[in-house]
């Protein structure tokens, strides 16, 4: 298992934990919680692969199912520990976000799409799983309202593009991108930075669809 | 029309009825109810076909649209009858679940995927339509919280695998699998068996993501 | 830029505006609102392209992203103006609906599918984006309960089919279809026509899924 694979599993684990914790707060049974955890972890990459018309990555490799299973075990057995570890999970989650973004960009570019599609796919890979999770537990998706999350992936995508344009070697581009996403995410939460909400107008009596 | 096709339509009918009834409880108009019914019936198979990268089954055969139409007619014309028939529909639904599981497994194996993907696809085929239904009517998906439902499909998948390993002929494997799913489902509801819920922790003030 | 492309962008703009307005009413941040607007505009066509197994249209042409960006700018800068313009947007939206329906039908027929699949794809292209929007903002989808919306696309599809059967030339068929959808939509809202709701039964204590 090389380093990238290791990071990939760490990210999957952290994403699955976040899904399982929110599902358990809604009193899902353990199978439902497992499904929500798995969907949180692989949902973004699955949509990406469907859009790029390549086989969904987790259907070629059973590890993602297994890692999600460990995440379930972990939450069930070490509930109190999980709460105390929340800063650790936050870091894992940010690392996963950074790596997933890079994977998403590279898969799109490999499929022959231009850079702007890569940026979207990187963002999808990182952030869509969390959105699916919120739809499944019937909440308004958090990523649309809190903190800097998806936008960190977008920034990472732009940085990837700039690095390429500056003729950085592939491995440097990947590292710079992932680290930027991770830093933006951590700094945003650390300093409570979020995007301004749009001022809500009253919903008109008859929304025009 | 052979026996399998007949069972397939019975399952489709039962799934569509369940979607239409829940939609009507939410005061959907009849077109909306029809859509929810159709999605409940074909949603699982559609996601399966998208993931396997084969053409969605209902786009090759208009019968599923028509069967869903009959389900709508049935609910509209025989409302009180439908309520009294609820045990019949429950049995139909269980039969559909068993058959859909087998279809899902076989399509995946035919597409060259390993058995564990087959188990997932069988479960998706059986249970994902009901989950989509609950998302459409804006409820927390029932299958994550009540009774044994998706897990019956998972058990069926394992039984399919064991039967194959025991060199049972194809038709026996199919029958054993479908019957197991149906029995597990019926017994679970009959005896009120469900998976334990995860103990919900309080959602932290600032969920990570 | 030819006339069809122009209409296409007008429709995209109107759909994006509707998504952004409803997202802002739910206090989404501007990035979230942009995503909801973009999904409202391209969601229907994306599902259509996935089902037809062709590359999603917006991944080949950055214009849809940009038009959605203008829609965001428009809502942010001209909030009060947007509210006053609601009748204009309603017309734009209806025009988009008509055009999207035609595009959906033609793409399906071009992919070798029969007419009834075309009607479904036309309806999906027109109406599914709005449904996704409502799922994202965690509301029961409006299109299932209010006004004539998706059903206008279905009628358009039938009219397309009849026009073809009458040997109308392609451009006449397209025009007749689009205009019918637009008129049906406008007249339905003007005269408050909607489909009857199904009489809701009480949801039984234990819904049979």
Image: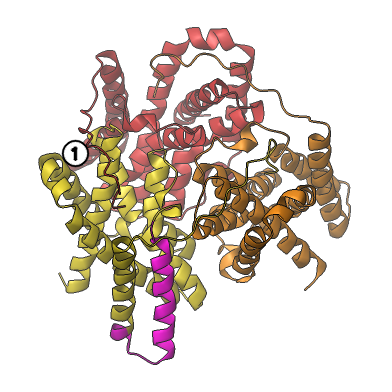
Chain colours: A red, B orange, C yellow
Tell me where residue A133 appears, x and y as whole percent: 48, 33
| Mark 1: secondary structure | helix
Tell me where residue A33 appears, x and y as whole percent: 59, 28
The residue singled out by tag 1 in the image is A162
**C108 lies left or right of A161:** right
Tell me where residue C125 appears, x and y as whole percent: 38, 62
Which residue lies at the image location 48% right of the left edge and 44% below the top edge?
A: A46
**What span is in magenta?**
C147-172
**Nearest to the observer: residue B113 or residue B200:** B200
Which residue lies at the image location 59% right of the left edge and 65% below the top edge?
A: B58
User: Which quadrant of the figure has residue A88?
Assistant: top left
Q: Residue furthest bottom?
A: C167
**Nearest to the observer: residue B98 or residue B65:** B65
Magenta-colored stretch includes residue A182: no
Can residue A169 be seen by looking at this rendering? no
Screen quadrant of the C terminus of chain B: top left
User: Which quadrant of the figure has residue C103?
Assistant: bottom left
Can residue C164 be seen by looking at this rendering? yes
Which residue lies at the image location 70% right of the left edge and 23% below the top edge?
A: B196
Asked if residue C146 is positioned above or below residue A155 in the image, the reply reads: below
**C27 lies left or right of B136:** left
Mark 1 closeness class: few <14, some 14–19, many ≥20 residues within 10 Å:
some
**B145 lies left or right of A178:** right
Report the predominant secondary structure element of the magenta stretch: helix
Which residue lies at the image location 44% right of the left edge and 30% below the top edge?
A: A4
**B115 lies left or right of A94:** right
Tell me where residue C174 appears, x and y as whole percent: 31, 79
Q: Label 1: chain? A: A
């Amino acid at each position: 298992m090389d380093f990238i694979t290791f990071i990939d599993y760490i990210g999957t684990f952290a994403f699955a934990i976040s899904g399982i914790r929110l599902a358990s707060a809604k009193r899902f049974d353990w199978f439902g919680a497992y499904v929500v955890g798995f969907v949180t972890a692989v949902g973004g990459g699955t949509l990406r692969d469907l859009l790029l018309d390549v086989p969904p990555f987790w259907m070629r490799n059973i590890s993602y199912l297994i890692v999600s299973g460990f995440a379930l075990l972990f939450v069930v057995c070490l509930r109190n520990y999980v709460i105390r570890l929340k800063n650790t999970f936050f870091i894992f989650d940010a690392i996963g976000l950074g790596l997933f973004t890079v994977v998403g960009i590279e898969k799109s570019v490999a499929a022959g799409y231009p850079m702007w599609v890569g940026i979207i796919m990187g963002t999808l890979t990182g952030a869509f799983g969390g959105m699916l999770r919120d739809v499944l537990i019937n909440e308004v998706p958090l990523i649309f309202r809190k903190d800097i999350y998806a936008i960190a992936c977008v920034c990472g995508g732009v940085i990837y593009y700039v690095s390429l344009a500056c003729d950085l070697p592939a491995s440097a581009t990947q590292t710079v991108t992932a680290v930027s996403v991770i830093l933006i995410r951590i700094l945003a939460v650390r300093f409570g930075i979020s995007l301004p909400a749009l001022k809500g107008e009253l919903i008109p009596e008859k929304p025009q669809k």
